[in-house]
Image: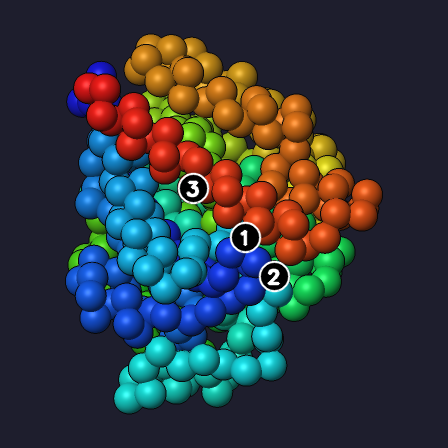
Amino acid sequence: MTNFMLLKGFEVELFTGTFAGENVGVASAITKDFSDFVKEPDQRNLEYITVPDQRYAVLKHALLLPRQKLRKWLDYKKLTILPGSTLSLGNTKIFERSDLENAYHSFIEKNYGTNVVTASIHINLGIENLSLLFSALRLVRCEASLFLALSASSPFLEGNATGAHSQRWIQFPKTPANVPMFLDHSHYVKWVQEQLDQRKMQNERHLWTSVRPNGPERPHILNRLELRICDLVGSVDLLLAITALLELRIINLQRNIKKYDPIEASSKTQQELAVMADENDLIAARYSLDANLSHWKNGKQIQCRDWIKELLLDVTPLAKELDIFELLQPIESVLLNGNQSIIWLDSYSKGVSIQSLLQKGISEMEQEETNFLQMKSTY
């Protein structure tokens, strides 16, 4: 089975804080004790990166073990890992620098402030064939809104409901403002160089869009696709389901470029596809599963839930062939019961406080780690 599978790795951003759900920044201290955690510009959140692997069982270990190690450290400080992707109860008026000597952090604080203080999941899939990589980038960019909708977990900011399901994606500064639908590697390299020359990008990493090519020496040496749009997904089983859906789409694309590459299969132009994808992302950020989106094939309106069901139906034969169909089941639960934001907002509308919702989320994340460790001990 694994011969057909792609290498997969994750960049996981987390908030730390009190058991009452209030943000407390300790990234500077944590990264001194743990070399496998990385500071973000604001020390209220931090990041860990998993080693790429093809196997989903191994990826589950890779995602949960750092969380469990971090939690032990935080317990000594009477702190914990917070759910959600924004400063739900945090102060957005101050920027808590994690490294006062870092010039890039200074640039980020000065230009973006706390709009960048968010937590998210970046999903990386290994694709070394450059032609396939840029086809995959086009497909995933056109469907990124669906993955955001499944993961949405940031309806609150500074103690209030914002009216959005992913406040993170609404506030996060997409940079540069207009990113084309890349036709191939040379198009991407030329475009990046133009942005650097015009100072629209500070460096090669300063491409903050829903999905981007990645590799050891951007823009020239690339080996993976990085989906950046997802909010923090507290449930690892759901994250693996989202990842499996993404991988299955790319494998189907690999088998039939003409059917799945939007440049080949859409009635829309390259520019129209780019604009449509960006608009879909913002609509999904506001309404997630209830959003009405424009399908990349023809521009027709389709409800987000229905589009995800369409994707699930399309990948089912391949999922069964690769023996990963069961991995997709948490998506069915989200379609039926709602994503994290929808569940939270439903309770909030009935009078449950944001603090109580965060406390329940803290408990659920901790319980998942406990269940995993108990299961591990029975092997």
Image x and y of residue 281, in percent: 60, 51
Query: Which residue is under mark 1?
Result: 84
Image x and y of residue 138, in percent: 44, 45
Of the image marks 3 and 2, the number of the one nearer the N terminus: 2
Kind of residue sitting beneath label 3: Glu
In depth, the one of 361 and 183 nearer the eye is 361
| Comparing labels 1 and 3, the label whose residue is closer to the camera | 3
Image x and y of residue 287, in percent: 71, 46
In the picture, the quarter occupied by the C terminus is: top left
Mark 1 is surrounded, within 10 Å at the Cα level, by few (under 14), some (14 to 19) or many (20 or more) other residues, namely many
Classify mark 1: helix, strand or loop. Answer: loop
One can see residue 349 in this view = yes
Q: Pointer 3 and pointer 2: residues touching (CB < 8 Å)? A: no
Q: Pointer 2 and pointer 1: residues touching (CB < 8 Å)? A: yes
In the picture, the quarter occupied by the N terminus is: top left
Mark 2 is surrounded, within 10 Å at the Cα level, by few (under 14), some (14 to 19) or many (20 or more) other residues, namely many
In depth, the one of 364 and 163 nearer the eye is 364
Classify mark 2: helix, strand or loop. Answer: loop
Tell me the residue at 46%/69% (across/down). Answer: 24
Query: Which residue is under mark 2?
Result: 88
